[in-house]
Amino acid sequence: MKMIHCADLHLDSRMEANLTKEQARERRQELLGTFTRMVAYAGEEGVRAILIAGDLFDGAGVSRTALHVVKDEIVRHPGIDFLYLRGNHDPEDFLRSFEGQLPENLKLFSDTWTFWDYGEAVVGGVELTRENQKRIYDILRLAKDRINIVTLHGQEADHGSGDGIIPIGKLQNRGIDYLALGHVHSYRLEKLDDRGMWCYSGCLEGRGFDECGQKGFVLLDIKAGRVKTQFIPFGIRQCTEISVDVSGLDTSPRMLEAVRRAAVQIPASSLVKVALTGEIPVDAEKNTAYLLQWLRENFYFAKLYDKTRLAVPYDSYRYDCSLKGEFVRLVSGQELAEEEKEKIIRMGIRALAGEEPEE
């Protein structure tokens, strides 16, 4: 038996914090497209059930398009069960869209333990609430001679309690073979105990730079009393953050070459954030707009942060009779933070060279 574990799809997420409105609109459609591709993949691979461990949607006010796309995929694939455990972002709108006529292959969880029997495996889960999360672990009963898959949505912790906290210690030695978790947006697979493992599948698509790296879902292959897992990268775009050390480089073309080398393996479809780091000469010619333009021409979306510092050799300016030397000595003698001095010196050197100050 094959099963897919996915979570945190956040369909209909706005994504307008970084992207233009047009790009955000395009990304919302891409998220829906990735969901439908995953369902198609499940059909092709003979997957029996898709386990959605919370946050299928991003919040209230889900668009009719998103509701209809998900509903249609479920109805069009009666041979695949959709085991849907709602997370902290999921609204009621989706279930209402069925107008009380839920398809047989849509299996829901609730605030009490619910189990679905697949012969060689049993899938159980519960939606965490403020009222139930202190008692649900003590009442969990699983047959030790079955493959037991349990799903929850929340933040794992070794111990402790609180809203949305999943104390891993209370789930150890309960007969769990695979603990399918949602809430954390990066793939993570860890040992639960001598018998089982716990796993965050991560989200299907990275939506911002707090969701960098490959995204996808986990394919479970259950046979001969064992659960084999495989992470399947599936996102069509990837969010990537890189630091580029431009120490000692004194011109924009040289800095651009360093950026090019650092970004050579990044697909053009990616969303990229670049941070320039290191110490550069006082009189370096650094045009961040020029660098950003290249990034925008070569990637779907790009951001550039300048975290460089000036390598100010104050001793070499001590007896410099030039206007630049006099300016550097004047600034260095002020009671200012080093970062503030560097900013003033940078702007002053550019002005003395007849260049426009950086914004």
Image (cartoon, helix red, strand yellow):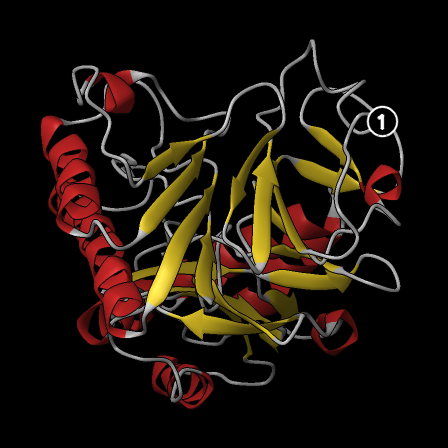
Residue 333 appears in view: yes
Q: Is residue 224 above or below residue 57?
A: below
What's the residue at 30%, 57% (across, down)? 356
Instruction: Give the percent coordinates (x, y) of residue 237.
Output: 30, 66
- Pointer 1: residues within 10 angstroms few (<14), some, or many (20+)? few
* Count of residue discs: 1
What's the residue at 17%, 21% (across, down)? 97
Indicate the amino acid at tag 1.
Asp
**What residue would you read off at disc 1?**
138
Residue 64, image quadrant: top left
In the figure, is residue 165 to the left or right of 221? right
Residue 71, image quadrant: top left
Q: Nearer the viewer, residue 183 or 75?
A: 75
Instruction: Give the percent coordinates (x, y) of residue 74.
Output: 21, 44
Instruction: Give the percent coordinates (x, y) of residue 62.
Output: 22, 25
Residue 217 appears in view: no
